Amino acid sequence: MPKTSATIRRAVVQAVRAASAYSSLKGIFNGFAPEQTEYPFAVYNQIAAPYEDDWTNRMTLSAFDIFVYSRNEVEANTLDQALADALDGAQLTVEDQTALICRRVNDIPVSPDVDEEGKKIYQVGATYEIWTDQPL
């Protein structure tokens, strides 16, 4: 039976947790970090996962935005680069699917935000595209 993109999400999170930069992060979260989470941390959002079927296989073309949040601009950029080094070209382990490619395809510039205390928060990240294949 064809699998959904849930296994791809798990593989992306596992790859981030395996990256050397993860030891500097306070976690990676889906969508939003819980209130009072310490900086720096990462957030991912799955933005697309269309299927392309032929008679024998299903290719899933997933896209994820992954951001690092920090109160320090240099730290945010350094951790983002470390995640790019770990994910761009990574051989992800996706359950019941063959991972074909994982690429950073787009940097996403975001202006600094200000929290309720008036302190700057830096958000640095990118879009990653993951292609997988599975038999139908």
Image: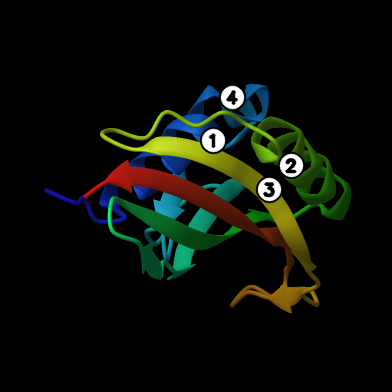
> Could you tell me how many numbered marks the image carries?
4
Residue that mark 1 sits on: 16
Callout 4 touching callout 1 (CB < 8 Å): no
Q: Which of marks 3 and 2 is nearer the N terminus?
A: 2
Secondary element at tag 4: helix
Report how far apart the C-alphas of labels 1 and 2 lie in the structure: 10 Å
Callout 3 touching callout 4 (CB < 8 Å): no
Residue that mark 3 sits on: 103
Residue at 71% over, 40% down:
88
Report how far apart the C-alphas of labels 4 and 1 lie in the structure: 10 Å
Q: Earlier in the sequence, mark 4 or mark 1?
A: 1
Q: Closer to the camera: disc 4 or disc 2?
A: 2
Residue that mark 2 sits on: 84
Horizontal and vertical percent position of residue 1: 11, 48
Secondary element at tag 2: helix
Horizontal and vertical percent position of residue 125: 71, 59
Question: In front here: 111 or 5?
Answer: 5
Secondary element at tag 1: helix
Callout 1 touching callout 2 (CB < 8 Å): no
Question: In front here: 114 or 126?
Answer: 126
Q: Which amino acid does label 3 sit on?
A: Arg
Callout 4 touching callout 2 (CB < 8 Å): no
Q: What residue type is labelled 2?
A: Ala
Mark 2, Cα crowd under 10 Å, few <14 / some 14-19 / many 20+, is many
Horizontal and vertical percent position of residue 2: 19, 51
